[in-house]
Amino acid sequence: MEELKEISPSEVKQLLQEGKKISLIDVREDEEVAEGKIPEAAHIKMGEIPVRLDEINKDEEHIIVCRSGRRSENVAYFLQDHGYKVKNMTGGMLEYSKD
């Protein structure tokens, strides 16, 4: 299995602050996202990823986000196996929301 690329929440913040165009996909449940998400992130629940693959551009790299980095890692591996370029945001929103 190909190794998964990772990105830290602070690196994601840096990219957003620099105005870089990045694709973020938040795979948490509706009630989790309701408590707040990264404004630039698209919301596609983990369970819906397989049926919504056509919404995810294969030509772009995507950063996958969840609460702690666990679910996003699973989704990232799934997408990578389907030929997508992805990175997992380690530590998830718990880490991202800290500061």
Image (cartoon, grey):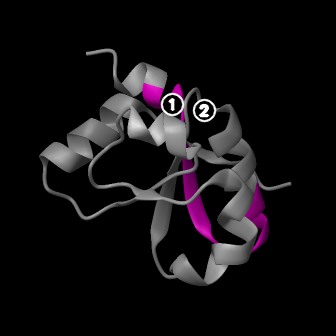
Callout 1: 10 Å neighbours few (<14), some, many (20+)?
many
Q: Which amino acid does label 1 sit on?
A: Gly
Among the two numbered marks 2 and 1 on one chain, the one whose residue lies closer to the N terminus: 2
The residue at 33%/41% (across/down) is 12
- Residue with the mark numbered 2: 69
Residue that lies at the very extreme toward the left in this rendered image: 18
Residue 13 vs residue 27, the one in the foreground: 27
Residue 58 seen from this side: no
Residue 47 seen from this side: yes
At which x and y percent is residue 65? 51, 43
Q: In which quadrant will I find the N terminus?
A: bottom right
Would residue 84 be counted in the magenta stretch? yes
At which x and y percent is residue 92? 51, 31
Picture quadrant of residue 56:
bottom right
State if disc 1 and disc 2 touch (CB < 8 Å): yes
Residue 34 vs residue 84, the one in the foreground: 34
Q: Which mark is residue 92?
A: 1
Picture quadrant of residue 96:
top left
Region of the chain picked out in magenta, as a range:
78-93
